[in-house]
Image (cartoon, rainbow, N blue to C red):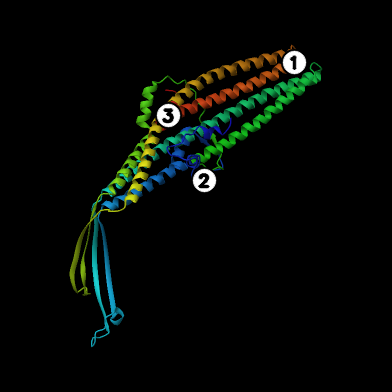
Amino acid sequence: MASGLLAAQTPQAPNQTAQTASSFHGSVTAGEASAQAIDLSLDEAIQRGLKTNLGIILSGTQTAAARGERLSQLQSLLPSVDASGKETVMQVDLPAEGLRIPGFPTMIGPFGFTDVRASLSWSLVDVASLRKTLAARHNFAAAQLSAEDARELVVLTVGNAYLLALADETQVSSVEAQVATAKISLDQAVDNHQAGTAPLLDELRARVDSQSLEQQLIVARNALEKDKLALARTIGLPLAQSFNLSDKAPYAAFDQLDVEATIRQAHANRKDLAAMVEQTKAAEEQRKAATADRLPTLKFNGDYGDIGTTLSHSHGTGNATGTLSAPLFAEFALRGEAEVAQAQLDTAQARLSDKNAQVDADVRDALLDIASTQKQVEVARSSVELANEALSEAQQRYANGVSDNLAVSQAEQSVAQANDQYVTSLYRHNVAKLSLARALGAGENYKNYLGGK
């Protein structure tokens, strides 16, 4: 059971790079390791992951950043009010200023004045800023939906890691049982050889089989410990904390579903698809903003305050200015901005179209995997029973001296292979169910799928 299956089964969110996808395999460690091992259920692991998984935390920070950008862009539509206070002392050298008046003093001052003033600036008509504000609002909505989708990915990632560790445990138990069986066969071959009823070849063959299984057991135990570390990394559990998996890998036959109805459910519930719809709307507003840059803008600027030699000897003054401006010659800049915005819109629309098709493919793939792995589990389970029966028959024949232990050795290998296939098919079947829950946008209701539907 290779731990590489874990990364292979985890899908990426929209516009995710490989580096971003790997964040779902990390976490922020919470708590301290205790000396005693703890019991960890699948639900407890998922709940921990929803709090400490790095993907969840990063999606939260991205949402906060999008909220900040929305607020910053909103300010461009609102009035800006500033207050200022000045206390000025001046002395003027008239000749330095170019004034030379006969009989007039060359130096004036020192003199001073106090100015306390409030100023107002407001873009009354600015269509481009309005469009950019709407785009920021859609980007914020997309970030919120992506954060919700991150929860789905955490459920899939943690569930996958837990099921993989369970498969490793089953594999270890299976190999331990095979080692015990091989030990019995080895003892039997040694006794028969010492009694002179079997050749040395039988003892050597049994010893090779026993040692081969012991090596497999070492590998299986190492894989289990590494995959438990990987699980701890996804849920923020201290790596020094030992734990036991309290749940066991369930198996339940999955009923056939209406494919078209299931696909419609996925389109209605998938948060990553909804996020991409919002991103496309944002790109549309950015394209409209690029066009609106050609339109005139109307701004108001005004101030009011008191000015005088002192505050007690001051007078109120103010001014108001309305400015209507329009670009007259900025064609290259405006055209370039529009082309960039159009390219971004075309990209967003293409990705949205692809995402719609991907949602369909995710559902169909998951249903195909469930049907296929369900048959594999049934066949593998039958193969395990047949292989164990063949091993028992071979052991009895060898014990009765009817044949040598070559048939026993071959039967033990068949049992090992059948157990490997059963463990692998059961793991893939449950992962396929988790993938279907994610494909339908119902990852947090994973229990309804793991237990059959």
Question: Which label is found at residue 437?
Answer: 3
Q: Which residue is mark 1?
A: 404
* Relative side of 58 to 308, left or right: right
In this orientation, does residue 417 appear? yes
Q: Residue at x 60, y 24 (%)?
A: 420
- x and y, in percent, of residue 98 in the image: 28, 79
Q: Amino acid at mark 1?
A: Asp
- x and y, in percent, of residue 243 in the image: 54, 37
Q: Give the SS element for disc 1.
A: loop
Q: Give the SS element for disc 3.
A: helix
Q: Give the SS element for disc 2.
A: loop
- x and y, in percent, of residue 224 in the image: 59, 34
In this orientation, does residue 37 appear? no
Q: Residue at x 38, y 32 (%)?
A: 353
Q: Residue at x 45, y 39 (%)?
A: 16
- Between 411 and 286, the one lying in front of the other is 286
Q: Specify which label sits upstream in the sequence, 2 or 3.
A: 2
* Relative side of 170 to 43, left or right: right
Q: Specify which label sits upstream in the sequence, 1 or 2.
A: 2
Q: Quadrant of the N terminus?
A: top right
Q: Quadrant of the C terminus?
A: top left
Question: Which label is found at residue 32?
Answer: 2
